[in-house]
Image (tube, rainbow, N blue to C red):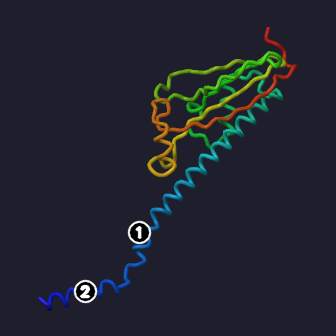
């Protein structure tokens, strides 16, 4: 029995003193954490870049309406202009919804707080609030775009999917950009 005990002690001491593979153990512990952080940084960078491009597209489209480049701003024309400028929006034609309402400058009524976004549960649902403004009217434009997370199973992407589990979102998240402008008085009223 003492011979077996001596052998066990010998192998245990040898195992404890052996440093081969120590780097691999550190790598196995640190690498997944590092990759999780990298994935979350990449996901948040993509969200930020897409939001900046959406804001830029809305600003340029509204500028084109204000200066008269887009003379009759229909939802299709505005969507096409926004999609032309905002290059980071995948499936822009189907994932972008416009909400355009007019308000009187003298008799203000609150703007609806609900935001119209693409309904992935019912893609044929044409929910659009669109009112083209007349001369000297304030027009408030809100644009909602739906995006899928780049990495939907880890980190920030997983949190986005879990927080948007209803059928309208379909595992996506919405980014909203808004702008307001006054229709210039040089425009002629439609007769």
Q: Give residue 5's quadrant in the image.
A: bottom left
Left or right: 36, with 190 as reference point? left
Q: Where in the figure is residue 83, as x and y percent of width and height? A: 65, 35
Residue visible at 54% across and 38% down in the picture: 173
Between label 2 and label 1, give the one nearer the viewer.
2
Residue sitting nearer the eye, 101 or 71: 101
Q: Is residue 91 visible?
A: no
| 98 versus 177 height, above or below | above
Q: Is residue 101 visible?
A: yes
Residue sitting nearer the eye, 179 or 56: 179
Q: Where in the figure is residue 171, as x and y percent of width and height? A: 47, 38
Q: Secondary structure at mark 2?
A: helix
- The residue where tag 1 is placed is 28
| 4 versus 82 height, above or below | below
Residue 11: mark in rendering: 2
Residue sitting nearer the eye, 73 or 169: 169
């Amino acid at each position: 029995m003492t011979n077996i005990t001596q052998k066990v002690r010998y192998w245990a001491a040898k195992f404890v003193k052996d440093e081969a593979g120590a780097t691999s153990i550190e790598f196995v512990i640190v690498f997944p954490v590092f990759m999780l952080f990298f994935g979350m940084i990449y996901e948040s960078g993509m969200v930020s870049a897409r939001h900046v491009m959406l804001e830029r597209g809305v600003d340029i489209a509204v500028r084109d309406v204000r200066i008269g480049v887009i003379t009759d701003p229909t939802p299709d024309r505005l969507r096409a202009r926004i999609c032309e400028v905002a290059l980071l929006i995948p499936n822009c034609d189907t994932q972008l919804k416009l909400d355009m309402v007019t308000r009187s400058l003298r008799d203000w009524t609150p703007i609806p707080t609900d935001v119209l976004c693409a309904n992935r549960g019912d893609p044929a649902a044409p929910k659009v609030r669109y009112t083209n403004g007349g001369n000297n009217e304030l027009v408030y434009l809100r644009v909602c775009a739906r995006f899928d997370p780049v990495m939907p199973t880890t980190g920030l992407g997983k949190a986005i999917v879990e927080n948007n589990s209803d059928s309208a979102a379909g595992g996506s998240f919405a980014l909203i950009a808004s702008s307001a402008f006054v229709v210039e008085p040089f425009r002629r009223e439609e007769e």
